[in-house]
Image (cartoon, helix red, strand yellow):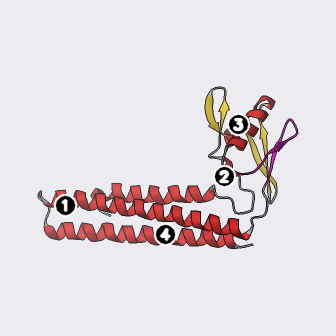
Amino acid sequence: MDERLSIYVEKMDKSYNNMLEEFASIRAGRANPKVLSKIMVDYYGTMTPIPQVGNVTVPEARILQIQPWEASMVKAVERAINMSDLGINPTNDGKVIRLVFPELNEERRKDLVKDIRKKGEGAKVAVRNIRRDANDYLKKLGKGDVSEDEIKDLEDEIQKETDKHIKDIDKAVEEKSKEILTV
């Protein structure tokens, strides 16, 4: 890999990894603690992700249990969950908050797959935009001391990286879709 292109490949990697993080937060009928990592709670004036204010466990396949380190945080965590787009009503016994994930119906599964495909398409657009930026950079290089053959080789290299990332994105979208549609 040419060091002049490494910055663009790193950006493509970041786009792919960001998409994977978004996929991790999509619930597939099973309780996954990662769905809470994007929900912020006011912790003494600082917005903090729920997993950083308490212990998150999965006692059963469809139940998440949150035990805040401080009893005073139970109401704040519960409020943050209610205000999020998680769509689950928390229950609490004063010390522990439980989230019961319902089984996904067929319509909800199809909606989630559409959402996954949309996120995948967004990641592909980001990768293609990075390729465009790289090609613009190479055109500027071509006006300098770099030969046309070298520019052509670099363009081929960035295209190969783009194709590889698009293929990886498609594979990840397919795997996540299959996971969601599996009852």
Mark 4 lies on residue: 168
Q: Amino acid at mark 4?
A: Asp
For the N terminus, the quadrant is: bottom left
Q: CA distance from mark 3 to mark 4?
A: 34 Å
Region rendered in magenta: 87-100
Does label 2 or label 4 sit earlier along the sequence? 2
Image side of residue 18 versus residue 125, left or right: right
Residues at circles 2 and 1 in contact by the CB criterion of under 8 Å: no
Image x and y of residue 79, in percent: 73, 37
Q: CA distance from mark 2 to mark 1?
A: 42 Å
Q: Amino acid at mark 2?
A: Lys
Q: CA distance from mark 1 to mark 3?
A: 50 Å
Image x and y of residue 39, in percent: 65, 43
Mark 1 lies on residue: 139
The dot on residue 53 is: 3
Compared to residue 9, the image places residue 37 above or below, namely: above
Picture quadrant where residue 116 is located: bottom right
Q: CA distance from mark 4 to mark 1?
A: 27 Å
Does label 1 or label 3 sit earlier along the sequence? 3
Q: In the orientation shown, which residue stands out farthest toward the right?
A: 93
Q: In the orientation shown, which residue stands out farthest toward the top?
A: 44
Does label 2 or label 3 sit earlier along the sequence? 2
